[in-house]
Amino acid sequence: MEDQWRISKHDSGWKDLFYDIALKLRYSLGDLAIRIDHVGSTSIFGLDAKPIIDIQISVLNYDDIKYYKTKIESVGFVFREENPDKTKRYFRELPGTRRTHIHVRQIGSFSEQMTLLFRDYLREHPQDCLRYAEEKHRLMELFKNERSKYVEGKGPIVWDIIQKAHSWSQEVGWKPGTSDK
């Protein structure tokens, strides 16, 4: 398995990887998944990113994990119970397979909406997209062997972009478009 802890130039094949996985998830989850969206940096055309596909699954009843956990696991993902973020259920790929992050969130929740807004804003604002990519490259150079510092280092630019995205959302009346799958 290739090292995916690096920043890569955007790869148009990431979209196809998302669709392949999302199709399997949609088949397994059916109507339990209200939305299945390609999120994170690989979902933004032209943005350099770690080559890790992030998928957000929005469900109606987030607390009823028994209804969706086994269905996601049947597609080849492992539930990560130790995840400290209480706004999402987190699943990862099976060992030895391509790195993929699955984030299950409550439909309409702040964290679900913020993730989609961040993605949509960057898709529409190439200058901020470039600024974000440059910062990710800089941080990766500084913290190649310290993942937590890399993630922590992105905080200021992410919050700056979120503030801009919030203002933009008010100007254009943003709402999430249709689900990716």
Image: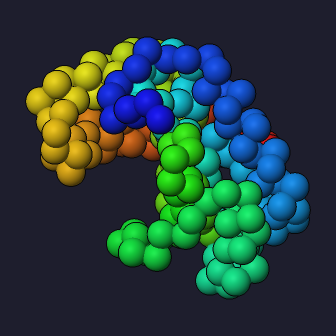
Residue under the image location 68 percent in, 66 percent down: 73
Q: Taking 155 as reference, is 118 left or right?
A: right
Specify the quadrant of the image occupied by residue 11: top right
Position of residue 110 measured from the top left corner of the image (x, y, whole percent): 52, 62
Q: Please state the total of marks drawn on the protein image.
A: 0
Q: Nearer the viewer, residue 49 or 76?
A: 76
Q: Taking 19 as reference, is 132 left or right?
A: left
Say if residue 151 shows up in the picture: yes
Above or below residue 134? Residue 40 is below
Residue under the image location 67 percent in, 74 percent down: 69
Q: Nearer the viewer, residue 31 or 157?
A: 31
User: Which residue is at the far left?
Assistant: 142
Position of residue 171 measured from the top left corner of the image (x, y, whole percent): 54, 34
Above or below residue 93? Residue 69 is below
Above or below residue 180? Residue 12 is above
Residue under the image location 51 percent in, 64 percent down: 90
Position of residue 100 measured from the top left corner of the image (x, y, whole percent): 54, 46
Say if residue 110 shows up in the picture: no
Residue under the image location 51 percent in, 47 percent down: 96
Query: Which quadrant is home to the C terminus?
Result: top right
Position of residue 46 measured from the top left corner of the image (x, y, whole percent): 51, 15
The colouring scheme, among rainbow, by chain, secondary structure or one colour, is: rainbow
Q: Nearer the viewer, residue 56 or 146?
A: 146
